[in-house]
Amino acid sequence: MKVLVPVKRVLDYNVKARVKSDKSGVDLSNVKMSMNPFDEIAVEEAVRLQEAGTATETIVVSIGPAKAQETIRTGLAMGMDRGVHVQTDDDLEPLAIAKMLKAVAEAEGADLIVMGKQAIDNDYGSTGGMLAALLDWPIGSAANSIAIDGGAITVVKEIDGGLQTVKLQMPALVTADLRLNEPRYASLPNIMKAKKKPIEAKTPADLGVDTAPRLKTLKVTEPAAREAGIKVEDAAQLVDKLKNEAGVI
Amino acid sequence: MAILVVAEHDNTSLKDATHKTVTAATKMGGDIDILVAGKGMKSVIAAAAKIDGVRAVIGVEHASLERQLAEAMETVVVGLMGNYDAVLAADTTTHKNYMPRVAAKLDVQQISSITGVESTDTFIRPIYAGNAMATVQSTDSKKVITVRTTAFAAAGESGSASTSDADSGIGALKSEFVGEELTKSDRPELTAAKTVISGGRGMGSGENFKLLEGIADKLGAAMGASRAAVDAGFVPNDWQVGQTGKSVAPQLYIAVGISGAIQHLAGMKDSKVIAAINKDEDAPIFQVADYGLVADLFKALPEFEAELEKAGV
Ligand SMILES: Cc1cc2nc3c(=O)[nH]c(=O)nc-3n(C[C@H](O)[C@H](O)[C@H](O)COP(=O)(O)OP(=O)(O)OC[C@H]3O[C@@H](n4cnc5c(N)ncnc54)[C@H](O)[C@@H]3O)c2cc1C
Ligand SMILES: Cc1cc2nc3c(=O)[nH]c(=O)nc-3n(C[C@H](O)[C@H](O)[C@H](O)COP(=O)(O)OP(=O)(O)OC[C@H]3O[C@@H](n4cnc5c(N)ncnc54)[C@H](O)[C@@H]3O)c2cc1C
């Protein structure tokens, strides 16, 4: 079974995004970038499937600028077999990303795609669903756990009311939620080993995908700021303020 | 302009998220129809027909729609989109599950979790955990939109829309529903509650969440949590508030033993009033709290409950 994991390079989750003064977007110059945390979880799951003997090959793919190679290397250092890098400097929308990932998945003959439920930068949370629909595959979104049995995969999903279990015929797509697993840190020897693992370079043109954007970003602004309030002395004063000043209890 | 709003329901009752999504649709202008896809959901159709500003309610029934499986919902919505210019649904897990599929099949870019409507094609949405707000204009001929319901008021219920049934068009599916483990609670729903009290890692254990229960009872509050508290197994996953959990905007949000990481703030900073109890006076939560109490929660919570009692709350 071949497992494909798409990963995205994003602003590190510890860094607070700053809006550019010309309102054209978020300032990404000289800030720490990392693999989208949900994608680390997806990589971890693929590596575990391989360690368990369920997966025979694991491929990590990223679409993005030259630096996206670093993100692919992170996946390789965690244990993925090889990488595919579709190089582009354009800001691509999930639809274009999903079309390119479809082309990669078909070329590779993937049986399972595990990816993040959302990227923490643009928060679209739509790439996985789009990719599944383009491939006509079933989807298990926001996975809390997965189990593969023959040609089917059982996915326990995190839903608003609790947990839901669905059974999908393979090939299938799963998006990872936070509690699917705890990703490992790559060890130094594995980081060294990863440097020798192959990364295939491609371009959007190779994949024959029209990547024209459908959305125009008119502006990006700061959200309304919240002012810090006051510190109260004790529980009695807190109740008094909430009742008599704010009127919310 | 004709807009389809997909109802949020559990086959018995229509959820408030639907009324809020209708409000977002109203801001775009045009005729609004509601799709109720489910099984045995007559009462939901009747309730949806009462929402103000709705032209018609379309019921589509099929076994696979009882749990609104992604592939099934895709088929139904795509099948109806020949008659509509836009489809809107709440950004709950139900709709997040299939709306991207609808967008891909229509070859349009979905616009996720909008918090504002500027015009028929221009919307505001938070990005980077709400640290930036993007105004985006869609050039697609059809719009596929999910709505951050906390940003819109609920539409009223004095309407009388027409109702009709439509065929599902659902064929063989590659997925099936196996089971569900729903968190049982008599408390209000987290995303709709007027008051929310949440606990974090500082609570120390699931057992200690009892300290919040008495207060939640008095305030009629829903209970929530930080990711750290969920990951530690203190409380169920559906309690998580934040960028990657639920967004809430109650009248009062009380954060207890929560540091205030950006990912948590993303899900609650639009609350009207925020109160925080934390023993660390430098905790970032105090930068957004209207009322901060620097104290050990194990001492402060029983006192808070007693003071509420005294104040007749
Ligand atoms: C209005 C707008 C502004 C943008 N601004 C920026 C910007 O400032 N900087 C910037 O870098 N990009 C920008 N982009 C491009 C964008 O970040 C994404 O590549 C694309 O929109 C995916 O959205 P998402 O990451 O929110 O998707 P989601 O659907 O939330 O991502 C889910 C999953 O899809 C997979 N995935 C997503 N993208 C990729 C990828 N490129 N390669 C491999 N797997 C992937 C991952 O597994 C990820 O976890 C912008 C796009 C739009 C529409
Ligand atoms: C991809 C990603 C997504 C995430 N999504 C979310 C999300 O949706 N929601 C979310 O909440 N987090 C999310 N996080 C996690 C987030 O970054 C923080 O780690 C998390 O919110 C911390 O939870 P906490 O405040 O309970 O714990 P901590 O940060 O450990 O804070 C505990 C607080 O309790 C206080 N405390 C301890 N003991 C006491 C006591 N006896 N009395 C009073 N106060 C006490 C401490 O002073 C401290 O401030 C996400 C992280 C990532 C990487």
Image (cartoon, coloured by chain):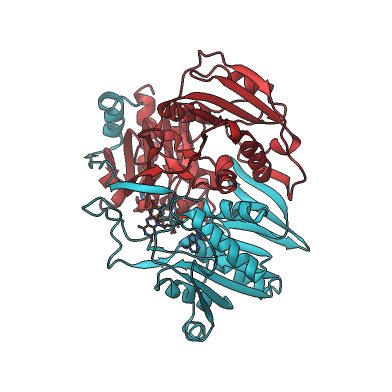
Query: At which x and y percent is residue B110?
Result: 49, 45
Residue B254: tell me if it is visible.
Answer: yes
Q: Which residue occupies 69% across, 75% down? A: A56
Closest to the observer, A28 or B142: B142
Q: Residue B137 appears at what percent x and percent y?
A: 38, 43
Q: Where is residue A186 in the image (x, y as percent from the top left)?
A: 49, 77
Q: Is residue B89 above or below residue A46?
A: above
Q: Quadrant of the C terminus of chain B?
A: top left
Chain B appears in which tint?
red
A231 or A142: nearer the viewer: A142
Q: Which residue is rendered at x = 55% and y = 30% of the image?
A: B4
Q: Can residue B261 be seen in this view?
A: no
Residue B237 image point, x, y percent: 55, 48
Vertical comparison of A175 with B152: above or below: below
Give the left or right position of residue B288, taking residue A40 as reference.
left
**In the shown orientation, is residue A246 left or right of residue A181?**
left
Q: Foreground residue, B218 or B138?
A: B138
The residue at 32%/37% (across/down) is B274
- Compared with residue A194, is residue B133 higher up or lower down, i.e. above or below? above
Chain letter for cyan? Answer: A
Q: How many marks?
A: 0
